[in-house]
Image (cartoon, coloured by chain):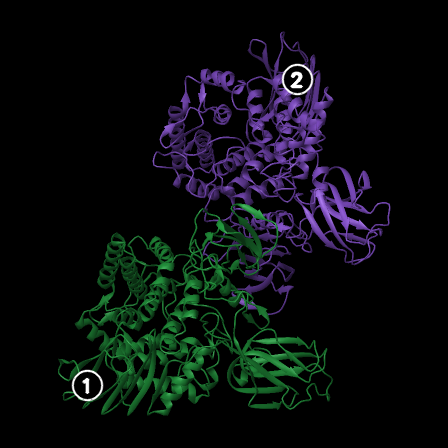
Chain colours: A purple, B green
Amino acid sequence: MVMNPLQQAEWIWYPNDYEVWLRGEVEGRREERGIPYPPMWKVERPYVNVAFRKKVQLDQEETLNIYAQGSLLMKVNDAVVYAPPPLRLPAGSYQLEFIVTERDTFPALFVSGTAAATDSSWKASCFTGKWVSPGSAGYSDPHRLPSVFSFDLEEQRPVRTWREADGRLLADFGKQTFGYLQLHGVQKGTQLFVYYGESLEEALDREYCELLDRIQIDCDVSWTHTKGRAFRYAAVEAAVPAGEQAFSLVHPVTCLYESLPVEYKGLFRCSDERINRIWSTSVYTLHLNTRELFLDGIKRDGWVWSGDAYESFLMNYYSFFELGVTKRTLAALRGKDPVESHLNTILDYSFYWFISMYDYYLYTGDMEFIRGQYRRMEGLMDFCLSRLNADGLVEGHPGDWVYIDWAEMDNTGEVCAEQLLMARSLEIMAYFSGKMGDRAETERYDSLANGLKSKTMALFWDEAQGGLVHHRAHGEVKPHLTKYANMFALMFGFLDEGRAETVKRRVMLNGEVQPIKTPYMRFHELSVLCDAGEHTKVLAEMRAYWGGMLDLGATSFWEEYDPSLQDSEQLSMYGRPYGKSLCHAWGASPIYLLGKHYLGVRPLEPGYSLYVIEPNLGDLDWIEGEVPTPMGTIRVYADREKLRVTSPGGTGYLRIRSSSLPAGYDGNCARMEDERYEIAITEPNRTYEIRYNM
Amino acid sequence: MVMNPLQQAEWIWYPNDYEVWLRGEVEGRREERGIPYPPMWKVERPYVNVAFRKKVQLDQEETLNIYAQGSLLMKVNDAVVYAPPPLRLPAGSYQLEFIVTERDTFPALFVSGTAAATDSSWKASCFTGKWVSPGSAGYSDPHRLPSVFSFDLEEQRPVRTWREADGRLLADFGKQTFGYLQLHGVQKGTQLFVYYGESLEEALDREYCELLDRIQIDCDVSWTHTKGRAFRYAAVEAAVPAGEQAFSLVHPVTCLYESLPVEYKGLFRCSDERINRIWSTSVYTLHLNTRELFLDGIKRDGWVWSGDAYESFLMNYYSFFELGVTKRTLAALRGKDPVESHLNTILDYSFYWFISMYDYYLYTGDMEFIRGQYRRMEGLMDFCLSRLNADGLVEGHPGDWVYIDWAEMDNTGEVCAEQLLMARSLEIMAYFSGKMGDRAETERYDSLANGLKSKTMALFWDEAQGGLVHHRAHGEVKPHLTKYANMFALMFGFLDEGRAETVKRRVMLNGEVQPIKTPYMRFHELSVLCDAGEHTKVLAEMRAYWGGMLDLGATSFWEEYDPSLQDSEQLSMYGRPYGKSLCHAWGASPIYLLGKHYLGVRPLEPGYSLYVIEPNLGDLDWIEGEVPTPMGTIRVYADREKLRVTSPGGTGYLRIRSSSLPAGYDGNCARMEDERYEIAITEPNRTYEIRYNM
């Protein structure tokens, strides 16, 4: 006879409270020149007191080990237990109700045992009469509180340390890094100033560097900072009398590098080393910003912005495929009810959240997460709908930020791109309400989406300019045309073939139209150009734009890059000499572009049950790479004669161009049209090698 | 030339955040036998980050002293100020925006100066795009953070200290008290157990006393507890070897009595010393429970319950007239949006809040406070309306508690008393929407109130029994009749004269109807009997009921008292031997009864601009007393021959009975009907002495 194994228990909490709390912690860390700099949106908080309950049937006496993050009140069959845990219960039937109260972090509970182990069968309540399934994240160690986040730590030494003429000690870590500064051999009691820089100029500029510390060394031998800092350079200045040396060692400054343990599951290599460097610098940039949550930048803001995260999610599907941080970020962004403002107060950022939810489902197939968030999707959409203007169009209310991009543009009135994002969000609500089995809601959302789409096209399509104009202000449609609405319309399939072709030619490939300067929007711009088959042109853009940053010494990609500026002007932004973030998640978009459009791997059905592999070399001789999926890794190699593909499962459509019938496959090969063939990839882990004539 | 005086600045915060935070602190203190016992409702929290802003015009250079409860980010004309305060500004025009972030207490700001002094002209925002008038409470000391609450402290010595046979040291403080236990002459490191008791039995019962402490003395000479405790008796047991004495002094145990500094503005004295003791014990009971907020009881729960507070408010108008605690309690009870459950999760308790708001306005005339809460009144009423059942009647939802009273009753289905409380709340919303100038809302609320009233009367009036029956369950009106609905209907004037008379005789004065056992509901029962002229009977009830508690040694009044129980059974409640609170605010109702119905002073128009004085001796030889009003104190003396009245302002109607025309007044004396006269009191601070024949 086999004994019942202990059921696997995990920490549980009120759903989304962990993520909401984590976001508050993360975003609360921002400083600017030593001044705490709080978020410019409502910081939300977990519930203080949460009740957890379960009816259990014990077949024999059992001792429950009970752990709480917070103070614990135990009720068994409605009677308070005055003794501390463990709780010994004779065989029988019990209504367990454990109330956890916690103000600093968030209430969480862990109960070991067979029938009583904390898992999704428990219910949680915040005392509003509703009992819901608890939140959890697979944290199964009762001795590690769920508020303690696990990072990897690794000592980094500077590649160069030197002393400036005025005595400042400079350390160059050779690349952007994030971690805890360590000072060695400094006498206890010494007062120091540290000036950090993503650039050397910044670290040397006491007056304008963005991050600085005034430190009193409070221990002997080695001192480690308690706050993580983002920097490549650190300038340390000691308040010691002239002539004396504050530092006595060879390596006085080191850094305890802190990073999220992730597996580098995605890979891209090709015949062009410049592109390879762009890819690996992109992955490093993304990794630095992939922490408790997806951050915008590590120096500044260190916040969670929905529009930035939207792109990080997509890059992540082609690199780490780390779903924990994705789910945490999505839950944290949505926050708590009531919805009183747009995500990050930005109109577009609410819409990107819907699109991110769709992408999450498409890339992972994880309907459980979607189901858990569905009421919250409805709630946010109700809010968005409640703020349409009298014409049924999206328009900013007081306090709303209509953002789109860092660029010269006038976003008053109804901005065309916002209408398209809202329409796409409505389509997504229609899709998910269908999945939830609510047919009436599907029809409602579909009808709202279609109404908004046709209204938008009728209003903003400018036949003379061959594209969608930017906005309508005070009832007047303005002739100004930008790429944003046009590329969204292409992405979302909102244009018929004729108009799509016109937009591509007259807007997207038109040098007269205002160029996009942020990697943030170049993400979509270049993706749309790839959709239009402009792979070679996009590679050229990558070499010039991201390569341009590398040429200027970038070790991670930037928040904004304008090749037309003088080198000395590259560091400033927001009116501050070093305001620009030089390690910005959205700078890493080549990960997405290369994975989706050159390796050409993308899901057609949720979780890659159906997917496409459509490699494109552009002007490269060969490419190879790996794309993670929920089932494992899809491997692709392609050169001008052959193509090799291995897939762990699902059904893939390998799409190739060949001037003659491809060779080397068995099974189906369908000729789709002239020179286009589609080969079904069905056998898991088999390496298909196909030969063709490009 | 006179220099501009510094404008009086005060601490400001996001409205209601102070009160919400304070409630969380207060309610978070409850313990039961050493176990933290959190509230059984959602604990709400202040915003973490709040922006405060003001446009100021400085005619000359000025230095602003800026204090924050929390971390401070200063923006002047949208530019961050990187230097710490004070802030020196040249003459000019500025947009000041100060963002305060605070997690432990609540964000608050204090700015001194002329134009920039923090006051109601500033605006506050929690980053939802709305700017609102800030909250404040007249805290004008920049060096005292508003989260530090001011109490009076006073050393109390026990009236008796003795040692039990087993070595326990017992201290009897002679009456209920609340404060910090102090132990003197105990050696540092000594371990002690303290068992508290509102009764001697409780303090002696290690196993079942409700409050206990395990203490390690961590200092020499004198040790003071950091937590306040409610008790009359303390039993201290030292873990020292037998034979040794832990205490060496004559007064080893004292108590640092903590109380809210209030002025005893109300007074009642009469020819019956038993009634006088009832009154003074009532005031002491109320004072102990009048702290940061109005508590239900000091031993248990120490929480803020809307139904309990409703009565405390009314008692307060006849005693301390302390409006700070009233406003704090009203704001804290309403909590924050969204409304997700009834106040304290109790149906009736939402309704009492509306009635309390009306009472507040009636007794104080403070429309500013009402105006500040009006949107929140609407929000709570929307919630109440959203939960009416299909028949448009009030009925509990899952998680709702339908309470009414601690008594044997079946509250399933639609409870008649709840309908009446809802109807009264709707009338109050109609009243205040009128004051706010929203005529459409007045009509809507009036029509809802009238609809509910007539529906209720039609459904629950039982002609055969001569009163309103208790409830309808599963569509069937049950014949069970209780006093609750009947006395509410009388109080709210919902019965015509005939039915009122019937109800008085066949329900309220009917010994067969289930008696009320809590002072909580005796409050209304006896008030209604006074309205019906039964003053002598009510005095007899007071002598028996509250006097009964005094006879059992009460030094403060109890949560419940059932004269039919054995003495030994009086301490238990909720299935626990000492579960009953022996110092419960609602026990103090004689304050209200004696002030309103014997001194007979009550406002007719808000803030006593119009009021009535209708003294009634019952069977007493003389009564005298003082009733506070916003204008000052109304003084009343009455015996069987004469009456003296002094009033600080407003217009009063002195109503008396006399078999002949009263003498001694000048001005108007109207004969209202046989033996009833009404004399106008118009001259401030004049003593009117009227002679009459009773």
Task: Spot the residue most to the top.
Answer: A660
Question: In front: A163, or A481?
Answer: A163
Q: Is residue A451 above or below residue B21?
A: above
The residue drawn where x is 30% and y is 77% is B527
Instruction: Give the number of the mark in front: 1 or 2.
Output: 1
> Where does label 2 land, which residue?
A617
Determine the secondary structure under disc 1: loop
- Residue A614 image position (x, y, % from top left): 61, 20
Quarter-of-image position of residue A668: top right
Whether residue A690 sits left or right of residue A240 in the image: it is left
Count of picture labels: 2
The residue drawn where x is 65% and y is 28% is A566
Whether residue B511 is visible to the viewer of this picture, yes or no, is no
> Where does label 1 land, which residue?
B665
Q: Which mark is residue A448?
A: none
Q: Is residue A323 above or below residue B256?
A: above
Question: In front: B417, or B304?
Answer: B304
Callout 1–callout 2 Cβ contact below 8 Å: no
Whether residue A174 is visible to the viewer of this picture, yes or no, is yes
Look at the image and tell me in which quarter the C terminus of chain B lies.
bottom left
Look at the image and tell me in which quarter the N terminus of chain B lies.
bottom left
Under mark 1, the amino acid is Tyr
Q: Is residue B464 above or below residue A149?
A: below
